[in-house]
Image: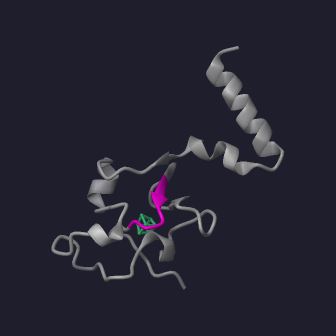
Amino acid sequence: MHYLNRRRVVQVALACAGFPWAVRSQAEELIATDPQAITLGYVADAAKVDVKKNPTYKPGQRCANCLLLTGKEGDAFRPCNVFPGKLVAATGWCRSWVKKA
Ligand code: SF4
């Protein structure tokens, strides 16, 4: 059996046993050079938002308080409805930010 296949089998077994963190690595971290990230002005650190290019940005906005962020509260990297299959930084921001109720 190929090494990666064995690794995947172990990940699935751990996930089935109640350890979902075992498959976390399947989703990639969104990087700022991703074409969609560029389109939406995504940055992993909201403190680095270019306010001239992003006039809708207000201090305090970040992925952690965005309605579109999913996943587990408190995780540093979480799924986002705007970037399927990717993980965004809780400290990040993009132009699709929507205030969480
Ligand atoms: Fe972050 Fe919200 Fe943009 Fe997703 S939509 S990257 S959670 S600001």
Give the image location of residue 70, x and y in percent: 58, 65
Q: Which residues are magenta?
A: 87-92
From the viewer's perspective, is residue 23 above or below residue 53? Answer: above
User: For ligand 1, which image quadrant applies?
Assistant: bottom left
Give the image location of residue 67, x and y in percent: 51, 75
Camera-nearest residue between 96 and 71: 71
Query: Which quadrant of the structure image shows residue 94?
Result: bottom left
| Residue 25 placement, left or right of 87 | right
Q: As drawn, which residue projects farthest toward the left?
A: 52
| Residue 99 placement, left or right of 41 | right
Q: As drawn, which residue projects farthest toward the right?
A: 17
Give the image location of residue 7, x and y in percent: 67, 28
Residue at 33 percent across and 55 percent down: it is: 37
Query: Which of the image's four quarters has the C terminus?
Result: bottom right
Please check the rendered image and state whether residue 96 is part of the magenta-colored stretch, yes or no: no
Give the image location of residue 18, x and y in percent: 81, 50
